[in-house]
Amino acid sequence: MRVGSFVLAAQFPGQGQGEALHRAVRSAEVAEEAGLDTAWLAEHHFVPYGTCPSAVTLAALLLGRTRRLRVGTAVSVLPTAHPVALGEQAALLHLTSGGRFSLGVGRGGPWVDLEVFGAGLEAYEKGFPESLDLLLRWLREPTVEAIGERFRFRAVPVVPRTSEALTETAGPEVVVACTSPASVRLAAERALPMLLGMHVGDEEKAEMIALWRRHARAAGRSAEEIRSAAHVSAGVCQIADRRADASEALAKAMPGWLRQGLDAHVTVDGRPRRMRDPLAYTELLCGLHPVGTPRLCADRLTATSERTGVDRFALLVEGTGDLAATEENVRRLGAEVLPQLR
């Protein structure tokens, strides 16, 4: 079982953006010290929900500051990025880090980001498969041309080529954030592992993985490709000596962050949107994920793995919004929970 942190660089009420980013960086540095497997970095624009606008840029910083930790994006939003530019960055990080970079990609949302970056609503509604396939070709082939609806260019050489890497894999791992049957099918047909959101429980994650396997088989993917797909389950982790203390720590801090963060999202076309109730959402997350004593946290992770088949986790550890508490949370995860999983 591989346990990593999920780093949002969340800006809690009363905090500055620099403070949020500093906590994000420190949480990843401490994750390496504590023996965690990966730091997964979120990406958001124009909202305090997350203050990191470029997960791949923050990944570069953290890969330079660590020696063992794998660093992944969770996720780089493809509709607002050029697949070739992102592919070049991913290849660069893969080669220079000795293969410690994972590229998580997603469709994002119908946010004003699409207007600011000139992508347009169609890039979100229809363009994700074309962008994903162009990205994959860039990471796997020596030369690439594009003749699609959104991207058109003559054949150009791929530089740097990840196939020249002296690592176990020919290129960086690519993971797809999946929240719908359509995205599950998209990932399965390409034999790409999924990143499953923290808002759903074990039963729904198990159903999504079963659907992924059906689509992968129908697409002609091999039994080995299906068996070896290492899906990632996102969640929340807060450790305390008593379960009530862990839940209370999140209940005091997370609703305020969620309220101001989620409410700041603006749709590109004015469509109405429904925001989750922050307190109810916090309570849901506490009930679904490893929040409580070290023994309870280990049991929760083990149960999720047994029910879903997932053996990789991306856990939000900054739910209190406090730097010292976040560092302690990460250290306890490494010292008191991981040994029980092994």
Image (tube, rainbow, N blue to C red):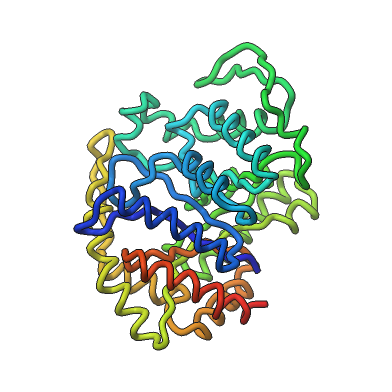
The location of residue 238, given as percent across then percent down, is 42, 74
Quadrant of the image for the N terminus?
Answer: bottom right
Q: Is residue 240 left or right of residue 279?
A: right
Foreground pick, 153 / 8: 8
The location of residue 266, given as percent across then percent down, is 25, 41
The location of residue 271, given as percent across then percent down, is 25, 40
Q: Is residue 233 left or right of residue 79?
A: right
Q: Quick one: which residue is furthest to the left in this view?
A: 14
Q: Is residue 223 left or right of residue 187?
A: right
Looking at the image, is 185 positioned above or below residue 3?
A: above
Q: Is residue 213 left or right of residue 23?
A: right
- Looking at the image, which residue is at 65% across and 28% down? 138
Looking at the image, is 319 positioned above or below residue 94?
A: below
- Looking at the image, which residue is at 37% across and 53% down? 22
The location of residue 11, given as percent across then percent down, is 29, 54
Looking at the image, is 195 positioned above or below residue 203?
A: above
- Looking at the image, which residue is at 36% across and 27% down? 117
Count the numbered circles shown.
0
Q: Quick one: which residue is furthest to the bottom in this view?
A: 242
Foreground pick, 254 / 223: 254
Foreground pick, 252 / 311: 252
Q: Quadrant of residue 307?
A: bottom right
- Looking at the image, which residue is at 43% across and 72% down? 328
Looking at the image, is 42 positioned above or below residue 57?
A: below
Quadrant of the image for the C terminus?
Answer: bottom right
Q: Quick one: which residue is furthest to the top in this view?
A: 154
